[in-house]
Amino acid sequence: MISGIHTINILLPIFYFLTLVVYFYDFLRGEKKLVNVKRVFLFITLFLHLIYIVLRTIAFDHPPITNVFEIFTILAITISFSYFLVELISDIRGTGPFIIILPLIFQLISSLFIQDLTEVKDVLRSNLLGIHVISALLGYSGFTISAVYGFLYLVLFKDIKLNKFGLIFNRLPNLEVLERLSFYSAIIGFIALTIAIIIGIIWLPIAFPRFSYLDPKLIGSTLVWLLYAIGITSKVLGNWRGKRLVLLSISGFIVAIISTILSNFLAHSFHSFY
Amino acid sequence: MNLIAISINHRTAPVDLREAVYLKEDEIRPFINLAKENQIKEGLILSTCNRTEIFGIPSSNDANHEKFQSLLLNFKPAQNITEQHFQKYVSRDAIRHLFCVATGIDSLLVGDNQVFKQVKDSFQIAEETNFAGYIMHRIFDAAIRTGKRAISETSISGGAVTVSYAAVQLTEKIFSNLSKKSALVIGTGETGEIAAKHLSEKGIGSLAVTNRTHEKADKLALKLNAKVIPFSEFKDSIYKFDIIISATASPEILLSKDDVKAALKKRSNNPMILVDIAIPRDIDPETRKIDYVFYHDLDSLNIIVEQNLTKRKSEIPKVEKIIEEELDNFVEWYNSLQAAPAIKDLRDFFEEIRNEEVERNKNKFSSEDQEKLDIVTKRIINKILHHPTIELRKADDSTGSGDSATKIGIIRDLFGINSRKKSEKD
């Protein structure tokens, strides 16, 4: 089983790369016949990724959420799965290459550095931790997709203003749809992060004797949560829309990235396990 | 095939000459009568602002392109038109040309949908005037099928290629659902009217028009079920509209940057699209600098138009492939109308039926009678087919003008010999 896991570990970045190539080719050419082909590629990659995660969980006796490289592979699958659903439900094409490049990067880093961990701290085997981490990751996946759609909104907005009617203009959906996709992804991310924070607040003080409310990851996540709370409330109340809203979404994503980097690689807290 | 075609079009003649021979609908019918009197037994007359074309199958072999030309020029006397202004086609080339016209690849505006409709209308007139015979009918069907295939299988008609339509296409890149948006069209001249029609066809939520001459605005509003805003008051209400298209002949700016700024403030920065398709411009181009205002003028719309035209041109080879396929199918069908293979197919068809029935029932007869049954049924079939066979051979020998083809075609259709053979092949 271990050799199978190692093989899939090498194959996964290749599969994500091939999927990206098909999506990118379709973006350039816009041929009808490629629509289903690219979905099949993404589906096969997702399926392979799911097998990989199940095999890892069985072989190493813990879900792959105990270090940053395990988390990266989960991030890769949650982002691609979320995008797969968005494409199926909304039938909006043309944004795929901009999203799929992210799982490729996450999976590539994960595949290069992931190790076969069999020894993990007992606290990391908790089910509550599993839900805490997975909901936090789903939250960040939602914010990532929201930021990508926000970024595409800004690019298209600028292109239309400057009379640039190239590939971006021809292939992307319209501005209102991009804004909506960015907003809905942010809402899903916000709900998931809220669940992660609630579980964290209830469970973390019990699980960790060194627990502190001044933990950098906790402060960072709260800041991100607050930013999205302000944005979503403003949109719902009708005060904010369009460019301002997507800028907020992109800012939230940047804060989330910075907070993750700071808390995982620079600061030492109870949230660091490796 | 004895099909002859002549065409005077945008490639061969300037607009004044095309105008001179243009046949209005009420002229086409008497012209068809004239053509019939001059031994053109079936055909098609297509006349639009860009082309006048005559397709016809003459009754005799001595008819040629010159006869078609003089027929047209006698009916519509026009000076300065020479033979060089006409394109001439015969047989397979004539059908190919008709297919090219129907698919829009021969149009001034490549992929123009309008011409497909005009070709269908011409077919309709030919049918109403009994100018569409058996062969022309099949040509019509093939042309319509080719036109439909070109539209559905390629992007030959994709994208906006007129400024008014490009304006509407642009709004669809900003707003997702036009039925929830409102639009104002300033100026109800030809361009304004077309833009308003496009918006209406796209299902705009609410449409308003304004014009210096109130009656013109009223007339268009009635046609499109739109509201009318008095020209003197429209500036005060621009904040109510998501899309504003301006196409007046006004020599000065109608909407200043300050007007638009004030409107946007009233709309709480809800995006506004301003499309200026007037020369000189109606809307201050400085408005493009305002955030949440998408300002576009003729120059920017022309970029879209040019891009779409280039894309359409790149689809021509795909359409040509479809045309060749349909042409091959048609020619294959036409060749099946030769007398010898048709007689053989007809005889095979009857023989097959006879044989089946004999095989199925021969056990009901004694062994001596079975042989007699075979002989008698063969004799019946031969007697039934004797006269049709003679007639088909006679028609084929005599005129060569397509009469035999028509007869054979009808016989094939009646007995389903073509479709039967085709399904056997498949």
Image (spheres, coloured by chain):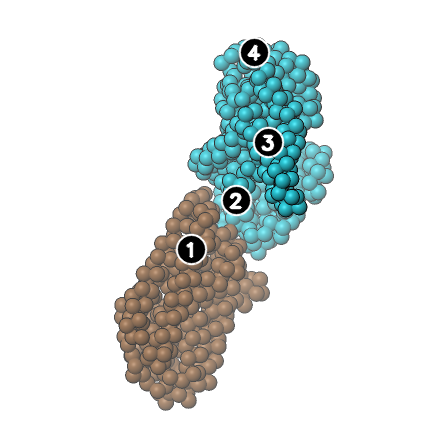
Chain colours: A brown, B cyan
Q: Are marks 1 and 4 on the same chain?
A: no
Labels 2, 4: front one: 4
Q: Earlier in the sequence, mark 4 or mark 3?
A: 4
Q: Residue at x 29, y 79 (%)?
A: A117
Disc 2: host chain: B
Residue B97 x, y percent position in the rendering: 51, 26
- For label 1, the SS is helix
- For label 2, the SS is helix
The quadrant of the picture occupied by the N terminus of chain B is: top right
Q: Which residue is mark 1?
A: A38
Residue B302 x, y percent position in the rendering: 48, 36
Residue B377 x, y percent position in the rendering: 64, 35
Q: Inspect the image, locate mark 2, and give the three-letter code of the amino acid beneath it.
A: Leu
Separation of disc 1 and disc 3 at Cα? 51 Å
Q: Which residue is mark 2?
A: B170
Q: Which residue is mark 4?
A: B62
Q: Which mark is residue B346?
A: 3
